[in-house]
Amino acid sequence: MDKIAVFPGSFDPITRGHESVILRAIPIFERIIIAIGENTEKKNFFPIEQRMAWIRETFAGHPTIEVTSYSGLTVEFCRKVGANYILRGLRTSADFEFERSIGQINKRLLADIETIFLLTTPEYTALNSSIVRDIIRHGGDPSDFVPSRIKIS
Ligand code: ADP
């Protein structure tokens, strides 16, 4: 059976931290589906089409990577696309506590799913999308924090 992973997230916008986790996961999985969750309760900064376009640009030339969006439960999306793994990144112990409960609940909802965590590399531990949004909101230059192929001004 092919190892297919879903990497769910908001990617608002994608950062070098996300990019690093995904690049390091490429050798582990036959396919990685980067899936932007359309969460009606969460107010997003960038439109979903823009977020998907940036992720596509970042991974152009990586044939095992796909980009899409979904609504509803992540495990239902995984079932629909035949994925047996959920990929997530871990930065801090706060991430761990948060991810542990989601991972354990997802496993209860769909027993065939395993959540796989990759540790962030030290230089990206402090990085998150909300910091990048703040830089952009206040007219700063985010280019050191987003993948080199994407241009946000
Ligand atoms: P969510 O809204 O689901 O938290 P994000 O887009 O913020 O979505 O994050 C998606 C995943 O990427 C999470 O597993 C998160 O831990 C991971 N991630 C975010 N920033 C980094 C980073 N700097 N280094 C490694 N992983 C990260």
Image: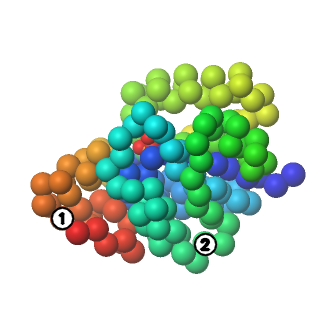
- Marks 2 and 1, how far apart at CA: 27 Å
Picture quarter with ligand 1:
top left
Q: Position of residue 5 (x, y in %)?
A: 68, 50
Q: Position of residue 119 (x, y in %)?
A: 49, 43
Residue drawn 87% across the image and 51% down it: 1
Q: Please say if 143 is above or below 14.
A: below
Q: Relative to the observer, which residue lies in front, 100 or 125?
A: 100
Q: Relative to the observer, which residue lies in front, 135 or 117?
A: 135
Residue farthest toward the right in the current orientation of the protein: 1
Q: Which residue type carries mark 1?
A: Asp
Q: Position of residue 126 (x, y in %)?
A: 29, 44
Residue 6 shown left or right of residue 2 in the figure: left
Residue drawn 75% across the image and 50% down it: 81
Q: Quadrant of residue 64?
A: bottom right
Q: Name the residue beneath numbered marker 2.
A: 62
Residue 101 shown left or right of residue 27 in the figure: left
The answer to whether marks 2 and 1 mark residues whose Cβ atoms lie closer than 8 Å is no
Residue 61 shown left or right of residue 147 in the figure: right
Residue 21 shown left or right of residue 31 in the figure: left
Question: Who comes first in sequence, dot 2 or dot 1?
Answer: 2
Quadrant in the picture for the C terminus:
bottom left
Q: Name the residue beneath numbered marker 1.
A: 141
**Secondary element at image label 1:** loop
